[in-house]
Image (cartoon, rainbow, N blue to C red):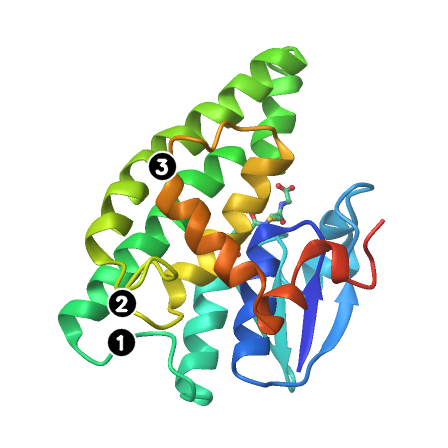
Amino acid sequence: MKLYTYFRSSAAYRVRIALNLKGIDYEVVPVDLRPGAHRQPDYLALNPQGLIPALADGDTVIGQSLAVIEYLEETHPHPPLLPRSTLDRARVRSMALNVACDIHPLNNLRVLNYLRSPLGQDKETVDTWYRHWIAEGFRGLEEEAKRSSGDGHHLFGTRVTLADVCLVPQMFNAHRFNCDVEPYPTLRAICSHLEALPEFARAAPGAQPDAS
Ligand SMILES: N[C@@H](CCC(=O)N[C@@H](CS)C(=O)NCC(=O)O)C(=O)O
């Protein structure tokens, strides 16, 4: 498998964690977002959505990190990233989607760039926007974590799930943009534990070959 990735892409970071947890070897294909390599014809030919990540398995390329992770879950079921019961799976997906659908898209590069130009917002305003959506999402996630974590080390139960795979990259972004994460002690404790696991550490932005 080949992963089209960018070291600081949190959506790619999710997929890197999932690949590592499942013990799948993959080739890294860096796509540099800064000069806009994801908008160039060669990348758009592979992934017309023009976003990172994309996973190539043979001749087939899949975009969207959660679709990729669900594909890995179905093709490589062990270890599972979703619990056994239908209800528990729904709860884990609910937390994962909070990050992937309600926090991350509002703070994506193209959204921030659009705020800067053509909307003409200055850095302070753009940073305030960024921090606002992190705070809005983390507030609810903190409450859910208190109810659903089984050990204070995982968002749900006592094993790594899809929800954890989404949380850790989002916490990385929160730190990168100097968001105040003091109000989320449960999320911080969970991330401290997970970030130290080798599968998460190897997926971290700073450990990527294209890190700069
Ligand atoms: N919902 C998509 C989001 C992908 C996404 O937004 N990726 C970012 C990097 S984290 C990207 O490619 N941004 C480029 C841009 O905004 O122009 C997924 O989960 O894969």
Residue that appears at 39% across and 61% down: 153
Q: Secondary structure at mark 3?
A: helix
The yes-or-no answer for disc 2 within 8 Å of ligand 1 is no
Work out whether mark 1 precedes mark 3 in sequence or the reverse, and give the earlier one. Answer: 1
Residue 42: where, in percent of width, then height? 78, 61
Left or right of residue 126: residue 40: right
Vertical placement of 172 versus 164: above or below?
above
Which residue matches tag 2?
Answer: 157
Q: Would residue 64 be visible to someone looking at this image?
A: no
Which residue matches tag 1?
Answer: 83
* Residue type at tag 1: Pro
Which residue matches tag 3?
Answer: 137
* Residue type at tag 3: Gly
Q: Secondary structure at mark 2?
A: loop
Vertical placement of 24 versus 34: above or below?
below
Residue 170: where, in percent of width, then height? 51, 46
Q: Quadrant of the N terminus?
A: bottom right
User: Of residues 184 and 139, which is closer to you in this image?
Assistant: 184
Mark 1–mark 3 CB contact (< 8 Å): no
Q: Quadrant of residue 102?
A: top left
Mark 3, residues whose alpha carbon is within 10 Å: few (<14), some, or many (≥20)?
Answer: some
Q: Quadrant of residue 149?
A: bottom left
- Of tags 1 and 2, the one toward the viewer is 2
Residue reaching furthest to the left: 87
Residue that appears at 64% across and 65% down: 201
